[in-house]
Image (cartoon, rainbow, N blue to C red):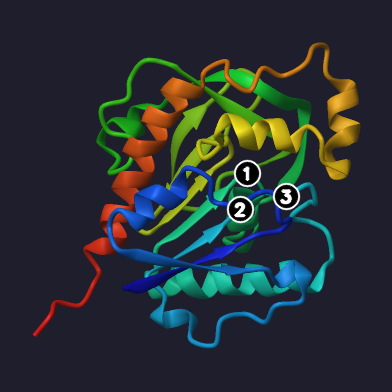
Amino acid sequence: MIEVCAFRHVGFEHLGLIAPALQSRGLAVQYVDMFDGAPPPERIGDAAGLIFMGGPMSANDDLPYLRAELALIEQAAQAGTPVLGVCLGAQLIAKALGARVYRNRVKEIGWFPVWWTPAAASDPLFAGLSAPETVFHWHGETFDLPPAAEWLARSEACAHQAFRVGTNVYGLQFHLEVAPEMISDWVTQNQNCGDVRELDAPIDPHANALRLRELAHLVFGRWADLLAARKPRSR
């Protein structure tokens, strides 16, 4: 099996519903926890794809592991390696490719709809999605679109919810990967307590979980298909 490198920024923000899409296509995953002292992969060019997960820190924080990840993203984007970023991961991609990351006008935490742009209609991951979809969010920052990016989704509180650069780089501000047990865990984490105290009402982890699972199966399955197509053929 070929390997996907998944970069976590805290242990509890893991692949979630991305994992079964990769596993069903024979794509092995290696977590790269540089925040916890792990070194970067030695042969990043051999990876089938790179995934950058979320986290409570800012893409603008001057942290050694974030600086290293920004360099890896830039390198992978130029090499044509598939890259997927979720929440903080999307912000890191935007920053690595020359866009500004900054505080959103409000924190967007909970279940809120996203709308698809006209470009999404022909996008390899989002084609066929036209009606608004209610997905899970947890972020306080946003970003400008990188140069040459295709804008794919928006919400009422945050204009830039998804984008693609070229054919190989995707950033998703929203969390399509979360299962109910992940949300239940997130609200108990010390790093998230400040955000939780600001909420007007508790988050229902199950509110739109069934539809989110269907969307994750579709979108991450399509992304995994792009990676699987890069497998060398058996001789």
Q: Residue at x 47, y 72 (%)?
A: 76
In this rendering, the answer to whether 6 lies above or below 86 is: below
Is residue 115 something one can see in this rendering? no
Is residue 2 something one can see in this rendering? yes
Within 10 Å of the Cα at label 1, are there few (<14), some (14-19), or many (20+) other Cα atoms?
A: many
Q: Residue at x 82, y 68 (%)?
A: 63
Q: Residue at x 40, y 27 (%)?
A: 117
In this rendering, the answer to whether 122 lies above or below 98 is: above
Instruction: First in sequence, mark 2 or 1: give its number.
Output: 2
Residue placed under numbered mark 2 in the picture = 53
User: Which residue is more in the foreground, 186 or 58?
Assistant: 186
Residue 96 placement: quadrant: bottom right
Q: Nearer the viewer, mark 2 or mark 1?
A: 2
Q: Position of residue 200 (x, y in %)?
A: 83, 12
Q: Under tag 2, what secondary structure?
A: loop
Asked if the residue at tag 3 contacts the one at tag 1, i.e. Cβ–Cβ closer than 8 Å, the answer is yes
Residue 137 placement: quadrant: top right
User: Which residue is more in the foreground, 28 or 112?
Assistant: 28
Q: Is residue 120 left or right of residue 5?
A: left
Give amino acid for label 3: Gly
Outermost residue, front direction?
Answer: 181
| Label number found at residue 55 | 3
Asked if the residue at tag 2 contacts the one at tag 3, i.e. Cβ–Cβ closer than 8 Å, the answer is yes
In this rendering, the answer to whether 96 lies above or below 89 is: below
| Label number found at residue 66 | none
Within 10 Å of the Cα at label 3, are there few (<14), some (14-19), or many (20+) other Cα atoms?
A: many
Give amino acid for label 1: Cys
| Label number found at residue 87 | 1
